[in-house]
Amino acid sequence: MIDIRTLSELMPMHLMVDRAGVMVSRGKTLAKVLGSASRLEDAFIPANNLGHRIRFEELFPQLGCGRRVFLQLRDHGGVSLRGHGVHLSPDMAMLNLGFGIYLSSAVQKFELNDSDFPPSDLAMEFLFLHEANRAALLELSRVNTSLEGARESAQILSITDPLTGLLNRRGFDVVFSKAFEARNRNPFALVHLDLDHFKEVNDRFGHAAGDRVLVTVASVLASGVRSGDRVCRIGGDEFLILIFSDRPEEDAMNVCTRMIHQIMAAKTYPCRITASMGVAVSGNRRITHQHQLFEMADAALYQAKLAGKGRVVLWTDPDG
């Protein structure tokens, strides 16, 4: 005859109950779960295989008939046990239970470990596999998120001028194409800027000094436009600006004039620096292709250079 202590070790999830529902014996793991409860219905809510609540008086006669036993913990609604039972005598029955799909929750709630289950029970192995799988999925998600972040960073870097932080020519082309397509409902001005006397800075003071000039000018341009406008460094000392406005001619001329004064007033240059700007607006009816607007802004910039530099010129149609 096996004693209760040995039975508790051998079957840590067993439960022995009498016909009145008194728990006569319980395995060591169930003892951790149930605490001081003495009656089955003090600790559990019995249910049938459809999940409907039943009383212990209904459950007891069904033990040993091949039906599964379902017991929900009263104090831990998120955990249920399942198993089967047999009659040891007309007034005594033994149940052997398990956590099933609630194993993970039970391990966390009751701080269970491998020693709480018999060596023949693969429950913990399945739990370890589940946790390992979840960890692997979380790591895969983290890696995917990291790769997505790296991809986004690479995209940003691909359209950004590394010296000034402005758009580069590739980034500007994307923005300009969209702006050109929407020019009828969202007019804008294209500004082509070239620094005057910049070659002298590089020749006399070196390229590091030239880079500092470019960074200063980029800061002036970026701070001189609104959030919806765009500034680009296309290379060397040349910049392009998109100024969106319902009055693109007037607003662009005002913004450009102010920028020229701010560039000239900066105190960080090793010698005198000015800027020349050419402006072309998107509303010209003769414009059918993007390159035409660039050519107009470039022609206006050339006129600004010829007129003495350090000024802004608006392109006008020579044919009226």
Image (cartoon, rainbow, N blue to C red):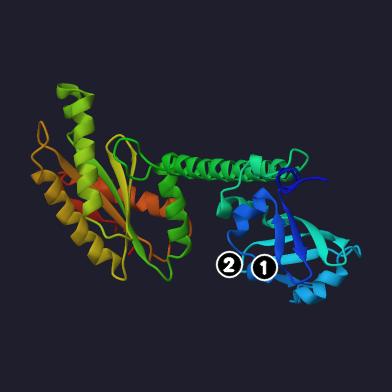
Residue 169 falls in image quadrant:
top left
- Could you say which disc has been placed on residue 99 in the image? none
Residue 231: percent from the left, percent from the top? Answer: 31, 50
Which corner quadrant holds the C terminus?
Answer: bottom left
How crowded is the residue under tag 2: few (<14 C-alpha within 10 Å), some, or many (20+)? few
The residue nearer to you, when weighing 119 against 6, is 6
Residue under label 2, please give it.
75
Asked if 22 appears above or below 134 in the picture, the reply is below
Q: Amino acid at mark 1?
A: Arg
Neighbor class of circle 1 (other Cα within 10 Å; few <14, some 14-19, many 20+) is some
Q: Separation of disc 2 and disc 1 at Cα? A: 14 Å
| Image x and y of residue 275, in percent | 19, 44
Sequence order check, earlier mark of 2 and 1: 1
Farthest residue in the front direction? 1
Image coordinates of residue 198 in percent, x first then y, are 20, 33
Left or right of 51? Residue 145 is left
The residue pinned by badge 1 equals 39
SS for dot 1: loop
Nearer to us in this view, 63 or 141: 63
Toward the viewer: 222 or 238?
Answer: 222
